[in-house]
Image (cartoon, rainbow, N blue to C red):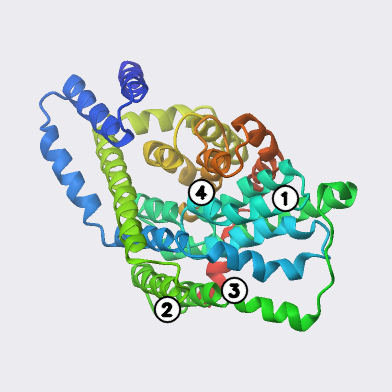
Amino acid sequence: MTKIVFSLVGLLALLLAGGVWIGLGLVGTGVGMIAIFRSHMPFEKLLAQQSFNVLSSAELLALPLFILMAEILFRTNISEALFTGLAPWLRRVPGRLAHITVLGCSLFASVCGSSAATTATVGRITAKELISNGYDRQLVTGSLAGSGTLGFLIPPSTIMIIYGVMAQTSILNLFMAGILPGLIIALSYMGYIGIRALLNPDLVGPAGPSTSLMFKLRALKDLGPLLALILVVIGSMYGGIASPTEAAAVGVAGSILLGFFQRTLTLRGLLEAGRDAANSCAMIGLIMVGAMFLSTALGYLGVPNYIATSIESWGLPPFALIVVLLIFYILLGMVMEGMGCIVMTLPITLPLITAAGFSKMWFGIFLVIVIEMAQITPPVGFNLTVIQRLTGDSIGRITRATVPFFLLMVAFVLVLAIFPGLVDIVPNMLAE
């Protein structure tokens, strides 16, 4: 079995290092392992069956719709509306407008399941405005990098959909379970920003003129369309009116109407959104097919059971196991995109977690948070690249700015391991 494991790691590393797409690399590794160790097995039939099973999954239908909604909203003026709607309420709060990135990303994440899209949409306005108004550059870029990752945690989430399909657990329950952790992480970011501003007022710009309550209330009208879209998409799912797929379809229609009413979405922009969404879906579909094919091939070879048994023989308590997996995923996220980390490792890590007494839903939230860490971990971190394009700063400088927010996520994961019931609070409340 040791020979099989080393062959697996070597072949996969060789393909990925050679620049092969992740999806094709996973398929190639599966084919190679079967050809070497199970030559009598017809891998082409297995690949065809796995491709059909994955791509015809009804639960997966929500994924392209949420991706399309995010692409459409990216082409509207939602980012400007978030800034003008929130700014009057934050001028006298410790940290002032620096909180806009956290609140803006939290709101936009409620209708967008993409971390990179959340970072780009909110950051293209807030980063420039805050830096030009005297806010500390590192505080701005760090808060944007950390807050942008909320696109994966606050529902709807593309990563949760993929995990739900692979782990065969309720996507709607995963969505509900992500609400409280997402809010806690957002509040921890805001708390950190407020404390830093109190300790060093020079980090934030001037307070600006005071405004009346009526002015602040009028500013909220800019948030009206986005809040209405959130209410329709999220409310319809949690109210039992629509399934995630149906809610996603309504969200696409709502985002198109929003863009046309704002006169910011043209027919050309809509076609570009459809094209980019199709590209993203094709990439995700290929990765999922490759991952499911490889996991099935490894199952026939007995690799997951061997690794799980080996780790169980260490006799690690549940908390220590979580720490080991946390370090493992952080290191893996440094060299691989987040979704690839999940689909490659889930067949091995999920049995370990369930054997340790954690639920599939809990592990889904854990994985989403550690994948968020991968989004701000060099050299592959997508959020770092997005912010580099927005600000022109070096990856090294942006990475240093994200360290406090990265550590806040690590701390929350450890809290989640100690109090796993946190993920059940909202699903249990809404189920009553």
Q: Residues within 10 Å of mark 2 (few under 14, many from 20)?
A: few
Q: Quadrant of residue 294?
A: top left
Q: Report which residue position mark 3 lands on.
A: 223
The Cα atoms of the two marked residues, 3 and 2, are separated by 25 Å
The disc, 3 or 4, on the residue closer to the chain's N-terminal end is: 3
Q: Residues within 10 Å of mark 4 (few under 14, many from 20)?
A: many
Asked whether the beta carbons under mark 3 and mark 4 sit within 8 Å of each other, the answer is no
Q: Report which residue position mark 4 lands on.
A: 368
Three-letter code, disc 4: Val
Q: Is residue 138 left or right of residue 48?
A: right
Q: Report which residue position mark 1 lands on.
A: 132
Judged from the image, the secondary structure of the residue bearing numbered disc 1 is: helix
The disc, 3 or 2, on the residue closer to the chain's N-terminal end is: 3
User: Residue visible at 42% across and 33% down?
Assistant: 308
Residue 309 in percent (x, y) is at 42, 30
Three-letter code, disc 2: Gly
Three-letter code, disc 1: Ser
The disc, 2 or 4, on the residue closer to the chain's N-terminal end is: 2
Judged from the image, the secondary structure of the residue bearing numbered disc 2 is: loop
User: Residue visible at 40% across and 38% down?
Assistant: 340
Disc number for residue 240: 2
Q: Is residue 6 left or right of residue 96?
A: left
User: Residue visible at 51% across and 43% down?
Assistant: 371
Determine if residue 170 is in view.
no
181 or 430: which is nearer to us?
181
In the image, farthest residue toward the top: 3
325 or 315: which is nearer to us?
325
Residue 114 in percent (x, y) is at 47, 53
Q: Residues within 10 Å of mark 3 (few under 14, many from 20)?
A: many
